[in-house]
Amino acid sequence: MSLKPLALFVNHEGASSRASVTCQYKCGNACSHEVPNASQGEYFRDIARTALSRRGVLRGAGIAVLAVGAGSALAACSDDSANGNVSATDPGGTGGKGGAAPTGTNFDVVAPNTQDAVVIPDGYEQAVVIRWGDPVLPGAPVFDFDNQTGQAQSQQFGFNNDFAGLLPIEGQPDTFLLVVNHEYTSEPFMFSGYDAENPTLEQFQTALAAHGLSVVEVQGESASGKLIPVFGAYNRRITGTTEFLITGPAAGSDFLKTSADPAGTSVLGTFNNCSGGVTPWGTVLSGEENFNPYFANAEMITDPIAAARLKRYGVEGAASERRWERFDKRFDLAQEPNEVNRFGYVVEVNPWDAASAPVKHTALGRFKHEAATVYVTDDGTVVAYSGDDERFDYMYKFVSSRKMMSGNSQASMRHNMTLLDAGTLYVAKFAGNSPDEIDGSGTLPSDGAFDGTGEWIALLRTGEDGKGESLVDGMSAEEVAVFTRQAGDKVGATKMDRPEDFEPNPKTGKVYVALTNNSKRGVDGAASADEANPRNNNKNGQVLELIDDHAGTAFTWNLLLVCGDPQAADTYYGGFDKSSVSPISCPDNLAFDPHGNLWVSTDGNALKSNDGLFSVVLDGPNRGETKQFLSVPKGAETCGPIIGEERIIVCVQHPGELDGADADSPASHWPDGGTNQPRPAVVAVWKPNGRIGA
């Protein structure tokens, strides 16, 4: 089925539709504050010119996408495009009118809308898998919105689900572990009569327990795509008081020591977990993102070096938004100045051992990790990609020095959970092929593509003994691990438009990056557009495609999508006919279906319709064809997509979170309808008697 042109009712001049109350609790109003990255670095156009001579060398040699070793979920193809032997100016097909819908993308398009519902294609069905407050552990009380307690919440599904991973249980058909993280709490929507200036102890304890992760066994229902939660042996709640181990070069550092943990090797809880990834060895990675607004009294830190470090991470002001410092001194920087340095890492959880301690990997650096996703090369080298979700911040990868062990033995698991503790951390630097043609308008260069080359600059090497070696002049290994943003500043990394989710394509090995938006690009003296970030006042974002030498330091790149109203001149859909695509804005999370198609979920749609989930064709005459599969309720964000042949799973985060609304005046009643309060939830969608997109 080919996509019919859509009637667009969106306003291209609009800004992100994310409510200010969401910004307030999710990221501490990051977009309204001064940009934390005030570094000068090297200007993109200058380095782009010097890179042009290298471009021919890179093209001639070709950047090999390495095959994947046994036990990995990723495998490389053997065709020329998969191996990187493609001109950067013709990255896989020019699109155009296209042909028949590729396998996996044949469905009736969902039109942009503002309904208070999950809207899905005709012929599909849906059901909630689990919602905030549903029981996770045996003995958990029935959810009672008006009588919440921390004790109850610590046994129930947490708030604002973001990432979701689905891990098959061996020997049990259609039975899985569903692992979900819980990014943040929106207290005005959790508690009736909430007083932001005077939260209660019970509200603090409940919100603390609503963070973290949930591990829940789910069983498929015969003849449908439903997933039913059960009380399995692996079920677990990880909360703001769960003990985590700290590994890597910052473990034991003076920067991480507190009165409660004088050794600097363990920390309670994980906060603001955004996206994540399932590793080929069966664990789950989760990124600690906007941790800064949880901490109070930054203005009382008078040491200029310490104050500058806090400012670079957006930690500022007096009282925190949630006032948690009133109940626990670790959130008060005046009393515990190092506690904030214990957040901002990639977390690893072993869902197969409910008694195991989760780990924070400091070898991967500290910043606002959107996620961490893994690619394994043919020799077992593990490469973990991660974006720093802040305007004008950077893209990173970590290359392990250890090799992955195949199999699911306890010895293999113990070894593989150390893979992210030894290796080299890099930051990305881009060069464009047409630097003189980029003026901030989003006009496509004369060569027909936004494209270029790049290099990974080494920041930190961690040895087998866990000790770090700094590769940045003027910084110690511990400083690079804990203040990674400043390390990126020093080496002149390229400032990007909110790099969020990275995902390697399991069919080709190419790596895709969601760059959500950056309304400050080229505004008030901030860095202006470059070829990878080609629009000033970028409200709609873009999706980047990397052909990476995974274990090496070179890559080529192009922009697959420059998002926004297809009728606008500054948008690009991989070369596909823009009259035949769904409008997409603010890409956030990425996923792949079994056929190698990219799927994109959005956050903050600047086109004034609800956020949604979209399929994007990557190769052939339909390259760039973008189709909306579903939309989420008003005020909500689409998170954590899992795309299978039998079902699609999405996390619906903060439904009804609109300015002027709260628990006393709800703007949504999803998912339970009636007069019920809105509740974040996980949803499964399936096609009866058929396959997704068939």
Image (spheres, rainbow, N blue to C red):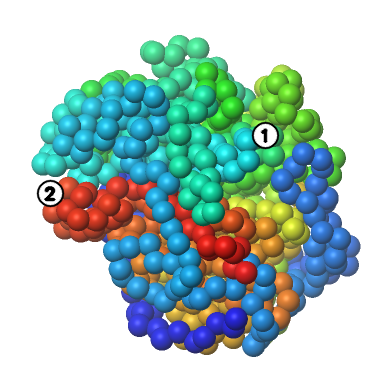
Closer to the N terminus: mark 1 or mark 2?
1
x, y (%) of residue 271?
A: 40, 35
Q: Which amino acid does label 2 sit on?
A: Asp
Identify whether 354 is placed above or below 47: above
Identify whether 289 is placed above or below 646: above
x, y (%) of residue 8?
A: 40, 83
x, y (%) of residue 422?
A: 71, 29
Binning the other alpha carbons within 10 Å of mark 2 as few (below 14), some (14 to 19) or many (20 upward) gives some
**Which residue sits at x=46%, y=42%?**
228
Label annotation for residue 205 = none
Q: Is 235 on the left-hand or right-hand side of 52? A: left
SS of the residue at dot 2?
loop
SS of the residue at dot 1?
loop
Q: Can residue 87 be seen in this view?
A: yes
Q: Mark 1 points at which residue?
A: 171
In the depicted view, which residue is nearer to us: 32 or 488? 32
Identify whether 637 is placed above or below 449: above
**Which residue sits at x=49%, y=18%?**
266
Q: Name the residue under label 2.
A: 664
The quarter of the rendered structure image containing the C terminus is bottom right
Q: Is residue 479 visible?
A: no
Q: What residue type is labelled 1?
A: Gly
The quarter of the rendered structure image containing the N terminus is bottom right
Q: Which residue lies furthest to the right in this view?
A: 61
In the depicted view, which residue is nearer to us: 479 or 570? 570
Binning the other alpha carbons within 10 Å of mark 1 as few (below 14), some (14 to 19) or many (20 upward) gives few
Marks 1 and 2, how far apart at CA: 47 Å
Q: Which of marks 1 and 2 is in front?
A: 1
In the depicted view, which residue is nearer to us: 499 or 5? 5
